[in-house]
Image (cartoon, rainbow, N blue to C red):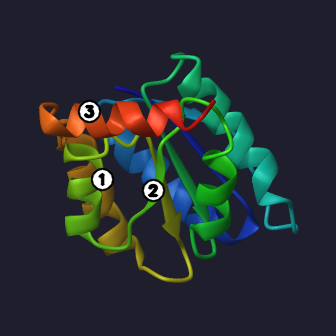
Amino acid sequence: MKVAVGCDHAGLAMKNALKDILESWGHEVADLGCYCEDSVDYPDYAAEVSRRVASGEYETGILICGTGLGMAISANKIKGVRAVVAHDTFSARMSRAHNNANVLALGARVIGPGLAEEIVKVWLSTPFEGGRHQRRVDKITLLEG
């Protein structure tokens, strides 16, 4: 799977760790920044990852900031993106199975690296169920205008 990853300064260590894990699982990973611990603006990185997912260049995106919240809000401004914050495996699974989420946002100040790895594993391996859920995802898409 082709995965684009991005973070702000608070998510740098987690992004770097997850990037290595994703590559060890055989995924193609594009690291779209940030690359330092200096304060940066998370919307810039959320937009870059989300635009590449929305265009189809990457199948999914993973964004990391302090809480995941700002990244998800920013990512969801990009047409074609369904970004979710998941801090547990159940939410990660349901976001894929029922909502066909294509961008995952994590909070490095909320969860630890072990849980982050489990969330990403579940999120990437859960297929969209379609069926009645497709109708709902289509309605979400209509809200984009």
Q: Are marks 3 and 1 in contact (CB under 8 Å)?
A: no
Q: Tell me the tag on residue 135.
A: 3
Q: Residues within 10 Å of mark 3 (few under 14, many from 20)?
A: few
Q: In what element is the residue under mark 3?
A: helix
- Estimate the spatial distance between the alpha carbons at disc 3 and disc 1, rounded to whole Å: 15 Å
Give the amino acid at mark 1. Answer: Ser
**Residue at horizontal 73%, vertical 46%?**
45
Sequence order check, earlier mark of 3 and 1: 1
Tag 2: residue type?
Answer: Val
Instruction: Name the residue rendered at 72%, 40% in the picture.
Output: 47
Residue type indicated by callout 3: Arg
Assess whether mark 2 and mark 1 are in contact (beta carbons under 8 angstroms).
Answer: yes
Label 2 belongs to which residue? 84
The image shows residue 104 at horizontal and vertical percentages of 45, 52
Left or right, 32 with reference to 43: left
Q: To which residue does mark 1 refer?
A: 95
> Quadrant where the N terminus lies?
top left
Q: Is residue 29 visible?
A: yes
Residue 86's image quarter? bottom left
**59 or 23: nearer the viewer:** 59
Q: Quadrant of the C terminus?
A: top right
Question: Which of the 4 image quarters holds residue 67?
Answer: bottom right
| Above or below, 112 relative to 83 | below
Return the residue nearer the eye: 138 or 2: 138
